[in-house]
Amino acid sequence: MKIRRWFIGAILLFFGLAANAPLAFAQDEVTAAAKKEGELILYLSTSLTDANGMVQLFKKKYPFINVNLFRADNEKLLNRILTESTAGRFNGDAIMISSFEVRVLMQKQLLQKYLSPHSRAYPEGFTDKDGYWTSVYSIPRVIAYNTKLVKPELAPKTFDDLLNPRWKGSFGLSDSATLWYTGFLKYAGEEKGRDFMRKLAAQKPAFRDSETVIMQLLGAGEFPLGLVYSHQAATMKKRGAPVEWVRTAQPIVTGLKPIALSARAQHPNAGKLFIDLVLSKEGQELIRSFNRIPDRGDVTSDLKEGTKLFPADPRWGDNYAKYVEEFREIFLK
């Protein structure tokens, strides 16, 4: 019996190694080709600290590749890519930008298909079915509250709870929260979602120009509730601010940070290596260390626990102007 089990185990091991052999061989080929290219040009819209951390990990693993980095916020990065493309000067290899901007790049045919071997570890909605992108990390918007002003048992547990008269004029909301608005309508249904938004508008939210400002004012006690990014709330809590955030209010609409291979890559193999590293378990653990929410399914995070994220589909961007106008019409006029 022991010999039989050993024999079966040996066969399974052999076939397992055989199945992985083509993948390992393919990776070796990509690495060899990237070594000949000798250069990598990155266009990233993450923070400078995050970008430098990813570049350092890449250089440690592939010291024979010189890395050139251009970093800016989403809008500036998109404008730079489009301007350079029109002038025939765009030569980026790997691009990391947010949900709707990646849709624009797809429409402009500035991305090429590259299905990383690590993409299979990502849940549905966090990787493109056609193989153009995979999301590196999530940026969820959640309800947060000041614990000195709101007792935990009285804090909203659902979005409908925000319609309670007690919260009138007491809820901080960014005047650019259109992605959240769009996601809410996609989740709840257009008619039901707009009905909720009109009721929320009647609660007279306190508008500010960013989630960061709302988070700061929430911690300072200017108002008791706000819609903010969960990682910002977690960071302020760690620093001792009297803030907590709600994990139960659905939907938790989350912006994505997709990474993709440029259609005009001059160093496509180096670009593939960078994408693979960022999406690997090692890369995602690095992302987690930045107090981000890694999207890889087998990498845990305190910010993931007890939540069910609703990812922003880049295709929503096809009708984004309509939702921007609706949001302004309901809340800001």
Image (cartoon, rainbow, N blue to C red):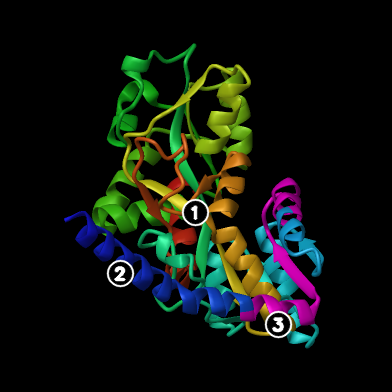
Q: Residue at x 42, y 79 (%)?
A: 130
Q: Is residue 59 visible?
A: yes
Q: Which residue is mark 1?
A: 255
Q: Amino acid at mark 1?
A: Gly
Q: Earlier in the sequence, mark 1 or mark 2?
A: 2
Residue bounds of the magenta highlight: 29-56
Crowdedness near tag 3: few (<14), some (14–19) or many (≥20) residues, C-alpha within 10 Å: some
Q: Is residue 154 left or right of residue 46?
A: left
Q: Residue furthest left?
A: 1
Quadrant the N terminus occupies: bottom left
Q: Residue at x 73, y 67 (%)?
A: 42
Q: Earlier in the sequence, mark 3 or mark 1?
A: 3
Image position of 248 with respect to 47: above or below:
above
- The kind of secondary structure the magenta stretch mainly shows is helix
The answer to whether the residues at label 2 and label 3 have Cβ atoms under 8 Å apart is no
Q: Earlier in the sequence, mark 2 or mark 3?
A: 2
Residue 47 is one of the magenta-drawn residues: yes
Q: Amino acid at mark 2?
A: Ile
Mark in the foreground, 1 or 2: 2
Across and down, in percent, residue 244 comes to 47, 24
Q: CA distance from mark 1 to mark 2?
A: 45 Å
Residue 282 is one of the magenta-drawn residues: no
Q: Which residue is mark 3?
A: 33
Q: Which residue is mark 2?
A: 11
